[in-house]
C-alpha cells in the first residue's frame, strides 16, 4: 500500500462529466489498496471569471479580498469531487487550504507555504477516506485566506506530498508526459520516461509549461517523486521527474528542445563601460515590474560597450519608453529594439560531460541560414535568440541533429 | 454614533454595478459617523448555479460537501463588496462565516447558530473598518463549513446584530417596506411604518415573504430592532419591526391581509372518532416530508368525525396517494381533495382587544358570495381557505372593509 498524491488541473475538472472521470480514476487507485490525497484546481475558466468580476468592481482590487474571491474556485471543485466520490461509493472528505491547514506567509496573491498540518489528513486517510484538498490556497497566521499565485495547485500537491512523505506525486494534465519538444512542431517528438528536476526546471522556464516551476523546485528540495501523466488516458506511465542519477551511463546528451515565441530584444549601443551601468539600465525596467530574461553585455572597446536583454513581447512598448528616458542619462549612443524574436534552447544534464553540444547546435542553425542574435549558456542548457520566423525550422533541425526521436 | 448591521440580498448585489451601489449606501452611513457591519447574500442566481453543478455531479449530494460548494457564493460577494468599499476610499475587511466565527451545530444545509465571536469584529470596527460578513454560513466545532439553509442571510444579520448589541438591523430588499397587502392586487395597499414581530411572523409565514421567518423569531427573541428597507431607493424609513407596544392606544385593529395561492385541501370523511387518529392520518404524510399547514378536526357525531388539512399544491398528488393507502387502514369512509384553494388571513395584534374582527371578515366575504371552506384562528390572525378564483376579490374587499388604505 502506497500513499499517492494526485493533482488535477482546471481542464481535468472542467465540467461535471470530467469530475466524475477523475473520481473513477481516483477510485481505481484506492481500489488497488493505495491511500490517495487529491489536490484540485478551479474548473477551467472559473479563476478568470472571478478575476473579471473583481476587475468589474474595482480597477485595483485589494489583494486580500482578491484572494477571498478567487479561492472560491478551488473550493467549489473539492466539494464537487467529493460528491462524485461518494456517488461512486467511496468515503471522501474535502479540505480548503484553511482547513488542512496550509499555513502560508501573508503575501496575498503570491503567498509561500510555510507549513502543513498533516495529522488530520493522515487520520482521515487511515479511516479509509480519500482526502480532497483545494490547491492554490492557504491561510496566514491570522486566519486570512491567501493564494499561491497562478498554477499554485502544483505547488500545493508537491507540498502535501512532502508533508505526508507520500510515495509519489502524480500531476495529471492534458498531456501524457514531458516531450523532447512540442509535438505540434516536431511530429517525431518523443515522450521522455524520465527527466531530472534540473532539466525540468530549464524546460519549464523556457516555455514547455507542463508544470509550475515552483512546484518542481519544491519537489527537488524535498525529494518528492513527481510524475506527469495525462488525465484523459487510463494507460501510460507519464514522465517521472527524478533526482539526477549520475551513475546512469545511458544518459542522453540532451533531453529536449525548449522554446519561447514571445520574445522582444533590446540593445543599448555605445554605453560607457563603467561599474553600475547594468543597474542604471535595468533598474528602471524592473521598477515597472517588467520581467527581464536574457541579459548579455559584451566586452567593451573604446571605453564603451553594448548591452542587450530580452523581455516578454507584451512589455516591448513600455520598455522602449523607459529606455528612451534613461538613454541620455546614461550617455548611450543608440537604442535598438526588435519585437519579433524567439528563443530556442537545448537542455540536458548530459552536456556537462559531453563537449561539443554548443558547436553542434550553432553549426546546425548555420547550415539552415538561421542567424543567431544572442547566446546564453548555463550548466545544462544553451539558449539562442533568433528571428521568430525561423523558430519552427530551428526546433525541427535541432531535434533531428540531437537524434531526439530515438529512445 | 450608532452601530448598524446592514443586510443585502442577492438582487441587491446581483452585479458589479449594484455592488458599487451598496458600497455607496454603506459609505453614506459610515460618513454619518456610524459603525457598519454588512451581511451579504450570494449574487442572485449564484446559489442556484452552484446547486445545479452539484446535482450534475451527484443525484444526492452529500450535505457536508454541498455546504462547501454553496457557501462560496457569499464568499465571492464579501470580497467584491470590500473591493468596492476600498475603491470608494474606505477601510473594509471581509469575513467568511468560519472567520467571524459564526459557530453552528453540524446540521449541514440547515444549521443553527450557537454562538458568534464578537471580539475581532468589534476590534476591526473600532479601527475604522467596515466589516463585511458572509451571510447564510457558519462553521461547526470541528471546523466543517455549514450553511443555515435558504434565506439564512437574514438570520446571520440578526444574529450579528444581537451579538454586537447593534442599535438597528437594516434588511435591504427589493421592496421599500412591509405593506398592508400585495400592492399588485390592491393598488391602495399602504406601507406600514411599524409592525410587531408577531404580526410579521404571521405575515411572513402566510406568504408575504419579505423576511425569513427564522430571522424574525431571532430578532424578537434577542430584542433586535429590525427595519426593512429598499436597496434601490435612497430615501424612506422602511418598516420597523418592533416588540409589541401595548400602551400604544392608536394601534390599528389589523395590520395587513396575507395570502397564499398554492394551497390544496384534503378532507377525510367518516373517520372513527378515537384517540390517535390525527397521527394515523398525518404521520405517513409527514414521513414523506410534506408540510401540512392548516389542520381542522370537527367535533364528531355518530362515533365518526371529519378531518381536514391543507398542503402545498405541489404535494397534492403525493398526498392523495398516501391517503388512499391509509384510508382502509383507518376505516375512513371517503377522501375528498381539491387543489385549487387559496388561503387569506387578516393579521393584527389589535384583534386581541377588539372583538368582532372575525364576524366582519366573514360578513365581508359572504356579501361577495365567497364560500369559506375552512377557518383557522390564532391570537392575532384569522385565516380562511377559499376557492382560488376568489382570491384577488377577497383580498381587495377585506383590505377595504378594514380600512387599511388609511394611515
Image (tube, coloured by chain):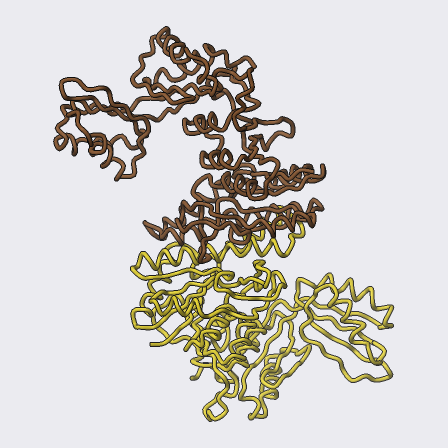
Chain colours: A yellow, B brown
Q: How many marks?
A: 0
The one nearer the camera, B158 or B67, is B158
Which quarter of the rendered picture does the N terminus of chain A lie within? bottom left
Q: Is residue A171 visible?
A: yes
Q: Quadrant of residue A91?
A: bottom left
Residue at image location 53% in from the left, 48% down from the top: B116
Q: Extreme front residue here?
A: B247
Residue A89, given in percent of the width and then of the height, sits at 29, 59
Residue A6, given in percent of the width and then of the height, sits at 42, 69
Q: Is residue B321 visible?
A: no
Residue A32, given in percent of the width and then of the height, sits at 30, 72
Which quarter of the rendered picture does the C terminus of chain A lie within? bottom left
Residue at image location 58% in from the left, 58% down from the top: A144
Instruction: Please indicate whether residue B212 sits to the left or right of residue A346 in the image.
Output: left
The one nearer the camera, B93 or A235, is B93
Q: Quadrant of residue B8?
A: top right
The one nearer the camera, A97 or A291, is A97
Residue A35 vertical placement versus B179 (above, below): below
The one nearer the camera, A282 or A359, is A282
Residue B144, given in percent of the width and then of the height, sits at 44, 56
Instruction: Please indicate whether residue B61 sits to the left or right of residue B76 in the image.
Output: left
Amino acid at each position: 500500500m502506497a500513499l499517492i498524491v494526485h493533482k488535477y488541473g482546471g481542464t481535468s475538472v472542467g465540467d461535471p462529466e470530467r469530475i466524475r472521470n477523475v473520481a473513477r480514476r481516483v477510485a481505481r487507485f484506492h481500489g488497488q489498496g493505495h491511500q490517495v490525497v487529491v489536490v484540485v484546481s478551479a474548473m477551467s475558466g472559473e479563476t478568470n471569471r472571478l478575476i473579471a468580476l473583481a476587475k468589474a468592481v474595482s480597477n485595483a482590487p485589494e489583494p486580500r479580498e482578491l484572494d477571498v474571491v478567487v479561492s472560491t474556485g478551488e473550493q467549489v471543485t473539492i466539494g464537487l469531487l467529493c460528491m462524485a466520490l461518494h456517488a461512486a461509493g467511496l468515503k471522501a472528505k474535502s479540505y480548503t487550504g484553511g482547513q488542512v491547514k496550509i499555513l502560508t506567509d501573508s503575501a496575498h496573491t503570491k503567498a509561500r507555504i510555510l507549513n502543513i498540518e498533516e495529522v488530520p489528513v493522515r487520520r482521515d486517510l487511515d479511516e479509509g477516506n480519500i482526502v480532497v484538498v483545494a490547491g492554490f490556497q492557504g491561510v496566514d497566521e491570522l486566519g486570512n485566506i491567501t493564494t499561491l499565485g497562478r498554477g499554485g495547485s502544483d505547488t500545493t500537491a508537491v507540498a502535501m506530498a512532502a508533508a505526508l512523505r507520500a510515495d509519489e506525486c502524480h500531476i495529471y494534465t492534458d498531456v501524457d508526459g514531458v516531450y523532447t519538444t512540442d509535438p505540434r512542431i516536431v511530429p517525431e517528438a518523443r515522450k521522455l520516461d524520465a527527466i531530472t528536476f534540473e532539466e525540468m526546471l530549464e524546460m519549464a522556464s523556457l516555455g514547455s509549461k507542463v508544470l509550475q516551476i515552483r512546484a518542481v523546485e519544491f519537489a527537488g528540495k524535498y525529494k518528492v517523486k513527481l510524475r506527469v501523466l495525462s488525465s484523459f488516458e487510463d494507460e501510460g506511465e507519464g514522465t517521472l521527474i527524478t533526482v539526477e542519477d549520475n551513475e546512469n551511463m545511458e544518459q542522453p546528451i540532451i533531453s529536449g528542445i525548449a522554446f519561447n515565441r514571445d520574445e522582444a530584444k533590446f540593445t543599448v549601443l555605445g554605453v560607457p563601460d563603467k561599474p553600475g551601468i547594468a543597474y542604471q539600465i535595468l533598474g528602471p525596467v524592473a521598477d515597472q515590474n517588467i520581467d527581464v530574461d536574457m541579459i548579455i553585455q559584451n566586452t567593451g572597446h573604446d571605453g564603451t560597450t553594448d548591452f542587450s536583454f530580452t523581455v516578454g513581447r507584451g512589455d516591448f512598448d513600455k520598455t522602449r519608453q523607459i529606455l528612451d528616458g534613461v538613454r541620455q542619462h546614461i550617455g548611450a549612443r543608440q537604442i535598438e529594439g526588435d519585437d519579433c524574436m524567439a528563443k530556442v534552447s537545448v537542455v540536458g544534464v548530459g552536456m556537462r560531460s559531453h563537449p561539443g553540444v554548443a558547436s553542434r547546435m550553432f553549426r546546425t542553425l548555420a547550415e539552415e541560414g538561421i542567424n543567431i542574435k544572442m547566446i546564453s549558456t548555463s550548466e545544462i542548457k544553451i539558449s539562442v535568440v533568433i528571428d521568430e520566423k525561423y523558430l519552427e525550422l530551428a526546433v525541427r533541425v535541432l531535434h533531428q541533429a540531437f537524434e531526439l526521436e530515438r529512445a
